C-alpha cells in the first residue's frame, strides 16, 4: 500500500505506516485475526459437530514429587457422515487445575460415521483428587494442511501472553507456527522439514538461550540453500511477534559473526 | 608407482597445500556486512549472498583486476516492537551522540585514498564517551528512563564489529542504514587503537547512510531513499531526519538547544531512481543491489566508476573495489598513485577532493582524463554517455609552469619549445577551455603554486616549495561556461621520471 500524506500534521499517521510496514516485515502483525483463522472442525460444544472427542480413558499415571499426578490418556473420537483423514485433536480449553503437558492427539484417518481410538495420547498433570474428565476439557479437531496434521489455530491472546505461546502437542513449535510451516512449506517434504527445523531451533533459542541453541539455529540458517532461506522470514516474523520474543532474539544473536564458512557446498 | 612413492608425493602435495592456503586466504579481501534495523538472520544472510553474487558474477571487473572477496557479517540490532519505538529511540541516541562527537569524528575521517591524518585522541574520546557509555545524557528519552540497558544490544554490535575488524584486518565494512552509525563507532575504536595505521586496516562503505559522516568518502545513498532523506518525501515526509520533531523528542547539543530539532545526514550521492517495488527505496537487496540505473550526484564521490555501468549494484561494486584497492595500496608499503580525481564545477573552481599521495618532481608526467558535457544537459553523472572524454598531459619542468590547458573548441594541447606544457596566456585560453593546475595544502589552506592566473608571457617558475612536496591537489578552472556545464577531471596516470 502506498500512502501519500503531505500534511505535516498527519506525520504521526505516516509514522505508524512507516513503522507498520517495517514491523510487519519483521514479525509484527500478530498471529492473525479470527477471520483468517481456521475454525476447528469440532468441539465439545455444540455436540452435534463431527468429528469430535467423546471420551478419554486414563492409561497410566505417575506420582510427581510435588504431590500431583501425571496422567496419560487415550481419547475416543466419533466421526460424522464424511470420511476424514489426517486429523488432529487438541485440547483448547482446560480448567486451571490441570496442567496440559501434551494436549494434542494425532487422530489420522476416520471412516464415515466411524469411531477412532488413536494410539497417540495426551499428558496432563493434576491433583490426585481432581483428574481430567471428558466433561472439563474443550477439544478442537483440525484438518490437515497440505496433508500434514496440524493443531488448530491457537487463541491469539493466550498465544502471545508468554514467550512459549501455545504448543499443544509439545513438539517444540508453537501451534500457529506449525500451521504456517505446513501451509507455506508443506507441499515439498524437504522444504517442510527444513522450515520446521528453523521454527524449532528458533523456539529453542527463545526458551533456552545458550551457545548450543544459538549455534544450532545460526548454522541451520547459514547453511540453508539460498532459494529456501529467502522464504524463511515468514517463519521468523511470525515467531518474533511480541516485544518479549523480539528482545530475546536480538539478545541471542546481536554481535555474532555471520558466516557461511564451514557450510558444506 | 610404489606405495611409498605415492605417500611421498601426497606428502609433498599436502605440504604445498598447507603452504599455499594462507596465500590463497591472503589473496581474499575481507568484507564485513553490517545490517540495519528490522532484519532477521535469514534476511541478513540473504543480503550477504546477494552481495557475494554481485561481486563474484559481475563482468565489471575481469582478469587481473578481479578480486576475490570473503564476505561475512555482524548481526546488528533487529526487530523490536512498534509499541516501545525501541529502534527509533536507539537511532535517536546514536544521532544525538553523533552531533556531540562531530568535531572529533572529522579528525578521524579520511578520504579512502588519501594519506591519513587520524587523531587517535579524538577517536578515543568518541569511543570512551559515546560507545563505552551510550547514554549521552542530553536527551528527553534518557530523562524519561531510556538508558544504558536499552542501548546494550547496539553497544554489543559495535564492540563485536570492532573485535571482528581486528581479527579480519584488513577489511571493508559494508554497512546498511543504522548499521552505519554502529560502524562509525567501531571505526573510532580502531582509530583510537591504531592512529594513522587504521588506514591500513579498514574502509567503510556506506549504504543508505543516515549518518552525517562518510568516514572514507565511499557513500552509496540515493536521494529517493524515503527512510533516510526528508527530501524524498515518501510516506508523508516521515524519515530518520525529521522523526525527532514528529515524536517531540528533545535534546541539547551544539546544534540543538533543548528542542525537538531534526537531524542532518550526509547528502545523497546518487539520484535518478524511480518508484520501485521497494516501498521506501531503502532495502539493501531490494534497492541498493537492484539493477535500476542511478546517476552520480555532482562531485559526490571521488572514484573511477566502471564506464557504462550505472546500476545500483554496479555502483556498490565500484565503491567496494575502490575501498579494496586503497587498502591494497596502503598495505603494500609503496604508496603509489591511487587517486582518480573528482567531479568539478566548471564555474566554481574546485579542488580534487583528495590530495594525491604523490611527490611532484621535475620530469614527472601526469595524464588527466577530462570529461565534459558540451550539451549543457542536466545530467550530472560524468559516466553518462553524453559526456565526452579527452586527455590532457602535464609534464613538470625544472623551470616551467605546470599549468595545463585545453581549448575545448579544438581539444589541442599547447606545447612549448622546451617540451613542457604550460600556459603563457591564460586570459586567451580561458576564453573557451579549462585549466588544471596543482595546488598544495599550506597552513591549512589550499594555495596555488602560482601567484595568480595572470601569468607573465615567459614561463612562470614553479614555486620552490612545490618540488618534493607530497599530497598535491589539482584545481580545475573553467572557461567557456556557456558550453560546458560540468567537468570531471581525473588523473589517469602519474609517471615519475
Image (cartoon, coloured by chain):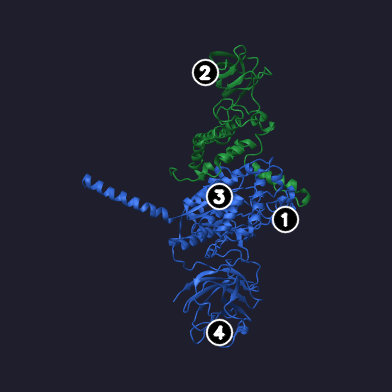
Chain colours: A green, B blue
Chain under callout 3: B
Q: From the image, state whether disc 3 or disc 4 is nearer to you.
A: 4
The reply to whether discs 3 and 1 touch (Cβ–Cβ < 8 Å) is no
Q: Mark 1 or mark 4: which comes first in sequence?
A: 1
| Residue that mark 2 sits on | A119
Q: Mark 3 or mark 4: which comes first in sequence?
A: 3
Q: From the image, state whether disc 2 or disc 4 is nearer to you.
A: 4
Element under disc 2: loop
- Answer whether residue B176 is visible to the viewer in this image: no
**Residue sitting at 55 percent across and 54 percent down?**
B187
Residue B460's tag is 4
| Residue that mark 3 sits on | B34
Element under disc 1: strand
Q: CA distance from mark 1 to mark 4?
A: 51 Å
Q: CA distance from mark 2 to mark 1?
A: 70 Å
- Quadrant where the C terminus of chain A sits is top left
The reply to whether discs 2 and 1 touch (Cβ–Cβ < 8 Å) is no
Chain under callout 4: B
Q: CA distance from mark 3 to mark 1?
A: 29 Å
| Residue that mark 1 sits on | B256
The reply to whether discs 3 and 4 touch (Cβ–Cβ < 8 Å) is no
Q: Mark 3 or mark 1: which comes first in sequence?
A: 3
Chain under callout 2: A
Amino acid at each position: 500500500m502506498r500512502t501519500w500524506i503531505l500534511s505535516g500534521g498527519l506525520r504521526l499517521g505516516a509514522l505508524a505506516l512507516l513503522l507498520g510496514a517495517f514491523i510487519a516485515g519483521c514479525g509484527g502483525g500478530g498471529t492473525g485475526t479470527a477471520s483468517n483463522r481456521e475454525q476447528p472442525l469440532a468441539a465439545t460444544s455444540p455436540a452435534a459437530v463431527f468429528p469430535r472427542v467423546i471420551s478419554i480413558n486414563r492409561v497410566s499415571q505417575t506420582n510427581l514429587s510435588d504431590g500431583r499426578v501425571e496422567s496419560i490418556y487415550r481419547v475416543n473420537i466419533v466421526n460424522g457422515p464424511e470420511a476424514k483423514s489426517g486429523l488432529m485433536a487438541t485440547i483448547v480449553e482446560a480448567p486451571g487445575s490441570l496442567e496440559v503437558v501434551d494436549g494434542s492427539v494425532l487422530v489420522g484417518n476416520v471412516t464415515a460415521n466411524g469411531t477412532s481410538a488413536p494410539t497417540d495420547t495426551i499428558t496432563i498433570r493434576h491433583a490426585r483428587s481432581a483428574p481430567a474428565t471428558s466433561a472439563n476439557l474443550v477439544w478442537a479437531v483440525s484438518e490437515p494442511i497440505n496433508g500434514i496434521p496440524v493443531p488448530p489455530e491457537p487463541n491469539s491472546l493466550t498465544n502471545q501472553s508468554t514467550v512459549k505461546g501455545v504448543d499443544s502437542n509439545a513438539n517444540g513449535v508453537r501451534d500457529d507456527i506449525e500451521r504456517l510451516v505446513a501451509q507455506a512449506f508443506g507441499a515439498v517434504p524437504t522444504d517442510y522439514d527444513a522450515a520446521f527445523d528453523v521454527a524449532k531451533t528458533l523456539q529453542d533459542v527463545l526458551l533456552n538461550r545458550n551457545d548450543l541453541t544459538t549455534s544450532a539455529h545460526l548454522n541451520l540458517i547459514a547453511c540453508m540453500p539460498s532459494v529456501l532461506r529467502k522464504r524463511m522470514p515468514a517463519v521468523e516474523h511470525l515467531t518474533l511477534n511480541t516485544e518479549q520474543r523480539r528482545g530475546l532474539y536480538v539478545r541471542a544473536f546481536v554481535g555474532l559473526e555471520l558466516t557461511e564458512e564451514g557450510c558444506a557446498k | 608407482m610404489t606405495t611409498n612413492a605415492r605417500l611421498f608425493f601426497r606428502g609433498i602435495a599436502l605440504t604445498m597445500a598447507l603452504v599455499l592456503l594462507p596465500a590463497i586466504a591472503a589473496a581474499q579481501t575481507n568484507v564485513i556486512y553490517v545490517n540495519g534495523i528490522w532484519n532477521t538472520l535469514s534476511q541478513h544472510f540473504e543480503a550477504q549472498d546477494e552481495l557475494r553474487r554481485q561481486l563474484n558474477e559481475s563482468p565489471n571487473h575481469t582478469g587481473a583486476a578481479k578480486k576475490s572477496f570473503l564476505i561475512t557479517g555482524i548481526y546488528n540490532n533487529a526487530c523490536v516492537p512498534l509499541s516501545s519505538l525501541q529502534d527509533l529511540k536507539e537511532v535517536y541516541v546514536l544521532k544525538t551522540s553523533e552531533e556531540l562527537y562531530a568535531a572529533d569524528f572529522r579528525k578521524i575521517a579520511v578520504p579512502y585514498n588519501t594519506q591519513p591524518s587520524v587523531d587517535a585522541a579524538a577517536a578515543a574520546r568518541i569511543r570512551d564517551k559515546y560507545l563505552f557509555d551510550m547514554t549521552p545524557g542530553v536527551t528527553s528519552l534518557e530523562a524519561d528512563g531510556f538508558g544504558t540497558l536499552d542501548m546494550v544490544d547496539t553497544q554489543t554490535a559495535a564492540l563485536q564489529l570492532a573485535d571482528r575488524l581486528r581479527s579480519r584486518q584488513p577489511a571493508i565494512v559494508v554497512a546498511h542504514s543504522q548499521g552505519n552509525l554502529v560502524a562509525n563507532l567501531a571505526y573510532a575504536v580502531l582509530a583510537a587503537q591504531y592512529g594513522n595505521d587504521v588506514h591500513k586496516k579498514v574502509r567503510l562503505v556506506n549504504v543508505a547512510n543516515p549518518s552525517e559522516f562518510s568516514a572514507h568518502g565511499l557513500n552509496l545513498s540515493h536521494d529517493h531513499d524515503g527512510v533516510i532523506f526528508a527530501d524524498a518525501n515518501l510516506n508523508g515526509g516521515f524519515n530518520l531526519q525529521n522523526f525527532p520533531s514528529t515524536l517531540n523528542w528533545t535534546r541539547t547539543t551544539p546544534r540543538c538547544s533543548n528542542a525537538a530539532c531534526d537531524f542532518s545526514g550526509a547528502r545523497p550521492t546518487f539520484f535518478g531512481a524511480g518508484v520501485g517495488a521497494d516501498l521506501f527505496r531503502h532495502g539493501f537487496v531490494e534497492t541498493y543491489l537492484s539493477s535500476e540505473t542511478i546517476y552520480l550526484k555532482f562531485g559526490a564521490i571521488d572514484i573511477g566508476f566502471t564506464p557504462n555501468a550505472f546500476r545500483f549494484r554496479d555502483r556498490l561494486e565500484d565503491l567496494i573495489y575502490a575501498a579494496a584497492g586503497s587498502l591494497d595500496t596502503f598495505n603494500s608499503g609503496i604508496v603509489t598513485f591511487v587517486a582518480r580525481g573528482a567531479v568539478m564545477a566548471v564555474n566554481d573552481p574546485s579542488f580534487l577532493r583528495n590530495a594525491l599521495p604523490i611527490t611532484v618532481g621535475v620530469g614527472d608526467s601526469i595524464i588527466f582524463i577530462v570529461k565534459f558535457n558540451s550539451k549543457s544537459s542536466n545530467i550530472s553523472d560524468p559516466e553518462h554517455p553524453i559526456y565526452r572524454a579527452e586527455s590532457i598531459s602535464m609534464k613538470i619542468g625544472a623551470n616551467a609552469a605546470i599549468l595545463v590547458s585545453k581549448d575545448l573548441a579544438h581539444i589541442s594541447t599547447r606545447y612549448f619549445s622546451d617540451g613542457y606544457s604550460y600556459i603563457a596566456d591564460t586570459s586567451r585560453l580561458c576564453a573557451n577551455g579549462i585549466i588544471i593546475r596543482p595546488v598544495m595544502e599550506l597552513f591549512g589552506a589550499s594555495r596555488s603554486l602560482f601567484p595568480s592566473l595572470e601569468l607573465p608571457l615567459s614561463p612562470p617558475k614553479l614555486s620552490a616549495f612545490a618540488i618534493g612536496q607530497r599530497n598535491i591537489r589539482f584545481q580545475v578552472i573553467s572557461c567557456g561556461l556557456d558550453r560546458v556545464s560540468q567537468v570531471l577531471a581525473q588523473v589517469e596516470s602519474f609517471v615519475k621520471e
